[in-house]
Amino acid sequence: MRAPALGLLCLIVLGGPALSLDLPEQNRAALETRVETFDQAIRANDTDGIIAVVPPKVLAFIAEKASVTVDELKQGLAGQIEQAMTDVTIVSFGMDLDAAEVAETAEGRTYLMVPTHSVMEAPNVGKVETKTHTLAFEDDGRWYLVRLDNDRQKAILKEAYPEFADITFPDGTMEILKAD
């Protein structure tokens, strides 16, 4: 399995002090639905469903840097995800909303850091476990999810959404599991 493909899969599939904020029940219900839909998309290798959780400004930023349209970018991402998924089996995947930390940017945007755990299996690699957080936030009334596993992903998010520029996001971990 090529490392970039695994990294892309991890991207798709925070720091600052947690504030004592309550997420209104209506927002929590919408987020729970979004997480459930994303979970189903991951398990079904549904590339459209996987890409649908990527925030629009992130897609626009990447498309501009690549000199393509957002639709062309989505088509390219779908192809890369499909290719990566031919070599990867999702053993387990989960986001723990009950353990999520709710916080707010200086500009007043509420966001959650959702503990996320996955185990994937790939030929010539074996099982790989990732433990990270998924950033969840609303943009124009819709919830989006961003896994921030590396500095490049964090930089793209902060360029696309400057209100996150001063937030310190925690690092994720990736570990190759020993054979059973």
Image (cartoon, grey):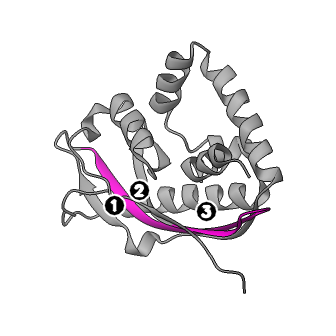
Q: Quadrant of the C terminus?
A: bottom right
Give yes or no for contact between labels 3 and 2 (Cβ–Cβ under 8 Å): no
Q: Is residue 9 left or right of residue 47?
A: left
| Quarter holding residue 53 | top right
Q: Amino acid at mark 1?
A: Pro
Q: Residue at x 38, y 42 (%)?
A: 154
**Residue 82 x, y percent position in the rendering:** 78, 44
Q: Is residue 26 visible?
A: no
| Quarter holding residue 42 | bottom right
Q: Which residues are magenta?
A: 109-130
The rendered magenta stretch, by its main secondary structure, is classed as strand
**From mark 3 to mark 1, how far is it between C-alphas?**
18 Å
Q: Residue at x 52, y 63 (%)?
A: 32
- Report the front residue among 87 and 77: 87
**From mark 3 to mark 2, how far is it between C-alphas?**
14 Å
Label 2, residues with CA under 10 Å away: few <14, some 14-19, many ≥20: some
The tag on residue 24 is: 1
**Residue 84 x, y percent position in the rendering:** 75, 47
Label 1, residues with CA under 10 Å away: few <14, some 14-19, many ≥20: few
**Element at label 1:** loop
Magenta span contains residue 117? yes
- 173 vs 67: above or below: below
- Residue linked to disc 2: 27
Label 3, residues with CA under 10 Å away: few <14, some 14-19, many ≥20: some
**Residue 142 x, y percent position in the rendering:** 48, 43
In the image, farthest residue toward the top: 67
**From mark 2 to mark 1, how far is it between C-alphas?**
5 Å
- Report the front residue among 152 and 74: 152
- 9 vs 92: above or below: above
